Amino acid sequence: MTTLTLADWQQRARDLRIEGRAFIQGEYTTSSAGASFDCISPIDGRVLAQVASCDEADANRAVISARMAFESGAWSRMAPAKRKATMIRFANLLQSNAEELALLETLDMGKPISDSLNIDIPGSANALRWSGEAIDKIYDEVAATPHDQIGMVTREPVGLVAAIVPWNFPLMMACWKLGPALATGNSVVLKPSEKSPLTAIRVAQLAIEAGIPAGVLNVLPGYGHTVGKALALHMDVDTLVFTGSTRVAKQLMIYAGESNMKRVWLEAGGKSPNIVFADAPDLQAAAQSAASAIAFNQGEVCTAGSRLLVESSVKERFLPMVVEALKGWKPGNPLDPATNVGALVDTQQLDTVLGYIEAGRNDGAQVLIGGQRTMQETGGLYVEPTIFDGVSNAMKIAREEIFGPVLSVITFDTAAEAVSIANDTPYGLAAAVWTADLSKAHLTAKALRAGSVWVNQYDGGDMTAPFGGFKQSGNGRDKSLHAFDKYTELKATWIKL
């Protein structure tokens, strides 16, 4: 447990040497065209580094590197137990460099340093370790055959994986994909978001230190419409995995169809309902959870509990509890260990969130708390966590993913109405149910069209539980043994004796 203070973190930020180049074939390198972009901290608007802006030429370089590494067999045909040991070393290196990685994450995308240090980096390391530890415990199958035949069902690495990851949990979302992709023997080209590329660039070197052969992991910072598009269209990429917006996810599916029919696995947007019934076992706990479900990580969470569905008979008593709970979530300097709400990632996201707040007001919803930009004197990008009451599920703020700390409160009278409202969305990523009635909990959970349903809590689960969505929230699953399905091909081998 670190005892570093705000002053300590500020000093470390001043001393930090930041690497901004791409990583191809085990080495840092400038982009082919020599292009770069400013990496700007949302904490105070200062330029942190110049980051390589990769393009199609760089995508080609990285894919060639990754393919050569795969075909060599140095990693792809390594014994699973040896890959496991390497993955565990990789995870340990993340932990031993946790303070540097946490500082990079906070400076880059604005999240509180306490979250980076205690949630993001340990979660990233755990994802690598868990996947590594699992890989020598996954068995193939022998089919039921006549006595003179043997039918084998085996898993093989898919080959070359391109992973395009988001800016809200930059390293953790990358590691959710790197863990199973690398553990199963694939080579990976990782494209971090241009909004938060720094930790991905740094961990590429740690992978080499861990013993992962050069070329197995390549990192290409840059924009989606350049290097991201090039990877999605590349004829030698076997699988494309993505976490981000539904709009981009749809476009990636088109690119896959236009190229080589590469497998595409997508984790996209959400507009998750948090349903509080009158018989919730602890309304105070539900209120605290509702506040954290929208304010944690500045609301920049795909599973954010952005629609709070409250049974009308308890609303008058419950809603003031939520307002009071949200008062404990205040924007502050992300380098202060006491801060629990940091800065929004960039000016585009700030404008988006403020635009939705204005739309909520224009549609007739009432702001109960928050709703304003704050701390402008710092040069940073901060918005007060906000609650809207009087929201109908037809309003823009209830229909569209805001990706900011904006909560819409909607009332209902019956369980059937709650389920109807909850499912009335193009998304299906997550949902929560608060009730002391066991049957109601089970029946409601079964009726909700969501990949994760939490009962009497919000955001439960760990690496053993699959993560992903229904409907336009995507396909496939991260985490758990089910994630390995995305990175392997099944082969049937039938032998006549």
Image (cartoon, rainbow, N blue to C red):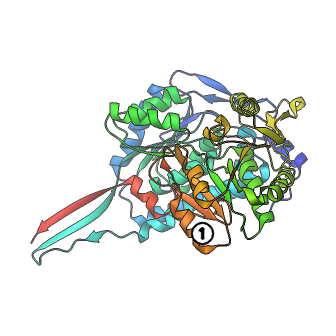
Q: Is residue 81 above or below residue 23?
A: below
Residue situated furthest bottom in the rendering:
147
Q: Quadrant of the C terminus?
A: bottom left
Q: Nearer the viewer, residue 93 or 346?
A: 346
Left or right of 11 on screen, residue 217: left
Residue 315 vs residue 66: left or right? Answer: right
Q: What is the x, y in percent for residue 234?
A: 38, 33
Q: Position of residue 247 (x, y in %)?
A: 51, 34
The percent coordinates of residue 169 (x first, y second) are 64, 47
Evaluate whether residue 100 shows in this view: no
Give the camera-side residue of 231 and 417.
417
Is the N terminus in the top left, top right, bottom left or bottom right quadrant? bottom right
Is residue 181 visible in the rendered image? The answer is yes
Mark 1, secondary structure of its residue: helix
Amino acid type indicated by mark 1:
Lys
Work out whether 437 lies above or below 100.
Answer: below
Residue under the point 55% across and 38% down:
245
Count the numbered circles shown: 1
Question: Dot 1, crowdedness within 10 Å: few (<14), some or many (≥20)?
Answer: some
Residue 34 horizontal/vertical position (percent)? 56, 22
Tell me what residue is drawn at x 60 percent, y 68 percent: 441
Above or below residue 427? Residue 79 is: below
Q: Residue at x 52, y 21 (%)?
A: 33
Would residue 121 appear left or right of 269 to someone viewing this image? right
Residue holding disc 1? 440
Q: Quadrant of residue 161?
A: top left
